[in-house]
Amino acid sequence: MNDRPRILLALTPLVEREVEAELFGATTALDVLGSAADAHELDELLRTHRADALLVSPDLSGLAGAHAAAASAAGLRVIGLALDDVGREALGTLGVDEILTLPIDEGALANAARGPAPPPAKPAAPPASDSAGGDGDDSNVIVVLGSKGAPGASECAASLAALAAGRWGGMLVEVDAIGPSLDVRLGADAHDGSLAGVARAVQHDEPGLRDLVDRWLVDRPGWAPTLLGAPDAVRDLARSGSAANAVRALAQLHPLVVCDVGFLISADDPDRVSSMARVHRETLSVGDAVVLVVGARDVQLRHGLAQLTELTEGLGVAPERLRVIVNGVGAPGAAARVEVEEALLPRLAEYRLGVDAWLPWDSRALASARKQGLPLASVRVLHGGYRRGLEQLLDDLFLPAAPVARTRRQRLTAPTSVGTGEEVAVPWHR
């Protein structure tokens, strides 16, 4: 039996020459399955090969955090090879499992590829390219996240899930490695069943997963069936592929899964992505749509724009997958809508994005939701703009009869001036 780790390479020629003997020598302890010359070829390798580990160098053309997250979501250990401290810092922001500084001792690559623990018992399915989005036609996953400053992302996720469950069925899943709190709001105990249990069941290929999930779901009137976050999410979900495999499994059981994901996705220190951020990144990699919630207060706008940059440039989330919600318009202390537009719309235009929903501050609905213990969208009040905004977002995301994702319509840049006889670009294009 061949127990040599199976390796994919995403290395520049300079780095590959440094480890040529370990990779291709007569006594190598590795099986090299394929090599990518740039990030585009890496997408194809991840789709077509089952491997144990991925070796990356930080200066590979087009390499982004999304590629490390996609490899982790497929159960691969991601090992970075650095030539110097600058390379180590760059690899740390990508969210790799381990960083080796060249030159290295004989056998170091094989030991790193094996890792501290055996791989999951049930291998993950190869991920789809980020530009395509999601994991295939059977997956219907919406990932909702915010940023620092409490813009109301968790409330949006709960409300979206409640509205979607009323139309098609579905569930809300709490994927927050920082501090899950839905158990308090729902008056339930996460130790009785949470995302961690699903992750362990998938890892060990437990039979009867549907029965287990049905037993663990918290079902409250006005809420979507809810799977609580893990009490110790980092311990239970930090293994490569654990969070992604759990969400994939849930998407096979329910027509729509709405994931409330913690805001931390970037490096929380200058040269390292934490385990918490890696859990959130991995969940982002399997979402069919990523909904970014931006608050209307000044500090929330600033943090929201930083999160937008991290999603688009740091993680390479394609515009076709990304939706932007502005929440709390008209709230006490919030900027006026025209001021929000002036600050936000030019930045969104750089990525050919726009605001997909404007959610007003609704003090009556908020007071009623707190009193009844319901998501905001489950509270029916006169002229409920919050609910209408999210319903419109669902209409834009899915076909009306079933939760099948619509094709994103890419926004075009409006012409600055039109001369006689010039053709005017339409504002939307499929």
Image: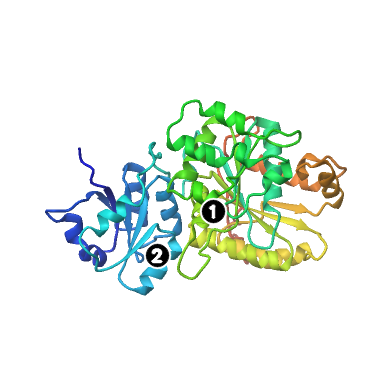
Is residue 163 left or right of 43 when viewed as pictured? right
Which of the two discs, 2 and 1, labels the residue nearer the N terminus?
A: 2
Say which residue appears at 35% left-offset and 44% top-offset. Answer: 118
Q: Residue at x 78, y 41 (%)?
A: 374
Q: At label 1, which amino acid type do we have?
A: Pro
Q: Amino acid at mark 2?
A: Leu
User: For mark 1, does the 10 Å Cα neighbourhood hold few (<14), some (14 to 19), or many (20 or more) residues?
Assistant: many
> Where is mark 1, residue-wise?
319
Residue 424 shown left or right of residue 246 in the figure? right
Question: 251 above or below 271?
Answer: above
Image location (x, y in percent) of residue 365: 84, 47
Taking 183 as reference, is 253 left or right?
left
Cα–Cα gap, marks 2 and 1: 25 Å
The percent position of residue 307, horizontal first and vertical second, equals: 59, 62
According to the image, what is the colour scheme of the structure? rainbow
Residue 55, image x and y in percent?
A: 31, 56
Q: Is residue 420 visible?
A: no
Q: Is residue 135 visible?
A: yes
